[in-house]
Image (spheres, rainbow, N blue to C red):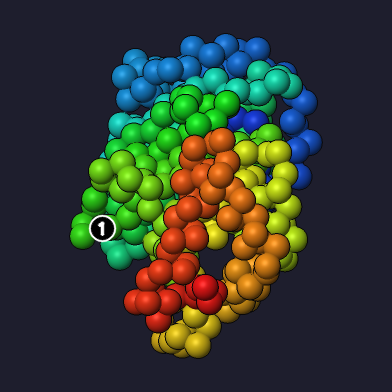
């Protein structure tokens, strides 16, 4: 099952708005506060590995996280454990967030440790120029996998930068080696995962510990349907990643094993039984957006051609 926040070793902070959970009231109340010194410190950390900062700067960075980002959801336990065990800042970075509204940042924290048996975990915050968190999200980044670093950069298939989380095998891990997280405004969304060869791979939704990135759980058929026909590339890619994913048949669920929620399995089945959604997928195979077309083709091919996959996972009839 997905681990508790306090038991994990990765933290992922984004400075700008996210789906999932809003910041606590005490954090929201100070969202408009100004702190020129901290703003300047954040700017001075941009593009640098926190591990390479002078000792005094590293202390300042840790103090900022403990004072402004610690709350009752368990982040404090992460820092206590980190201080006592490793004090490792090997994968900590700060980037300037691509926001049209105000000065914001992305901050990534991960101390290269692994909890077995479980999944690496990350936290994503959006904070303002004064370092105050506005919203937050948390998610797994790979079963028995470890962070190998991260970067915030452009890709040739989206107009805005994406956060790319790179992973390495921890102990018999088999998760994705790269997780691509794009932003729909300030909301993070998984739009691509790759294996060790750089090939795209489907998300294994049937096994909760293997699912990575911010969760996509459409409340109804209408949400993915609208995403496939709209003009928002991030929403479209997010929906296609979900539709290409491996969702276990409800009839194959084992009560003594961790598995996808029955309601989500049924929601996926409803989506793939929809003639409208199936038609949108076929139309997107002709998209001028090469990655959108690739995902749509993979959905059509996988869901219609592999009898072994159909035996174990939910696929509609041809």
Q: Is residue 21 above or below residue 311?
A: above
In the foreground, 305 or 147: 305
Mark 1, other Cα within 10 Å: few <14 / some 14–19 / many ≥20: some
Residue 181, position in %: x, y? 51, 40
Residue at 54% over, 31% down:
158
Q: Position of residue 245 (x, y in %)?
A: 47, 61
Q: Would you name the residue on which mark 1 appears?
A: 173
Residue at coordinates 72% horizontally, 66% vertically from top-left?
A: 220
Nearest the eye: 248 or 230 = 230
Q: Quadrant of residue 243?
A: bottom right
Q: Quadrant of residue 88?
A: top left
Q: Secondary structure at mark 1?
A: loop
Identity of the residue drawn at 45% across and 85% down: 252
> Is 135 situated left or right of 167 in this image?
right
Q: Please state the horizontal and vertical placement of residue 248, each as a whole percent of the image.
A: 47, 75
Q: Relative to 168, is 181 on the left or the right?
A: right
Could you tell me residue 44's position as x and y percent?
49, 12
Give the quadrant of residue 165: top left
Viewer-proximal residue among 264 and 156:
156
């Amino acid at each position: 099952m997905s681990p508790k926040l306090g038991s994990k070793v990765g933290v992922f902070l984004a400075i700008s708005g996210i789906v999932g959970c809003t910041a606590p009231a005490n954090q929201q109340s100070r969202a408009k506060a100004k702190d020129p010194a901290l703003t300047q410190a954040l700017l001075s950390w941009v593009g640098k590995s926190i591990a390479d900062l002078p000792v005094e700067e590293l202390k300042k960075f840790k103090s900022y996280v403990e004072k402004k980002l610690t709350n009752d959801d368990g982040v404090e336990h992460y820092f206590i454990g980190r201080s006592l065990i490793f004090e490792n800042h090997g994968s900590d970075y700060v980037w300037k967030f691509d926001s049209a509204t105000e000065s914001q940042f992305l901050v990534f924290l991960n101390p290269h440790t692994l909890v077995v048996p479980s999944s690496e975990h990350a936290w994503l915050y959006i904070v303002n120029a004064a370092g105050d968190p506005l919203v937050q999200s948390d998610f797994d980044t790979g079963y028995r996998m470890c962070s190998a670093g991260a970067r915030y950069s452009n890709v040739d298939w989206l107009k805005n930068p994406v956060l790319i989380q790179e992973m390495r095998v921890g102990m018999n891990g088999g998760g994705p080696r790269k997780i691509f997280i794009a932003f729909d405004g300030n909301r993070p969304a998984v739009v691509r995962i790759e294996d060790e060869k750089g090939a795209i791979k489907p998300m294994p939704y049937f096994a909760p510990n293997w699912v990575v990135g911010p969760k996509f759980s459409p409340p109804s058929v209408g949400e993915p349907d609208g995403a496939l026909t709209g003009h928002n590339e991030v929403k479209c890619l997010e929906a296609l990643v979900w539709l290409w994913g491996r969702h276990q048949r409800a009839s194959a669920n084992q009560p003594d094993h961790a598995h996808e929620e029955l309601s989500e399995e049924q929601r996926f089945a409803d989506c793939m039984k929809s003639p409208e959604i199936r038609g949108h997928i076929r139309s997107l195979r002709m998209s001028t957006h090469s990655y959108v077309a690739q995902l749509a083709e993979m959905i059509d091919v996988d869901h219609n051609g592999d009898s072994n996959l159909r035996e174990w996972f939910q696929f509609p009839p041809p």
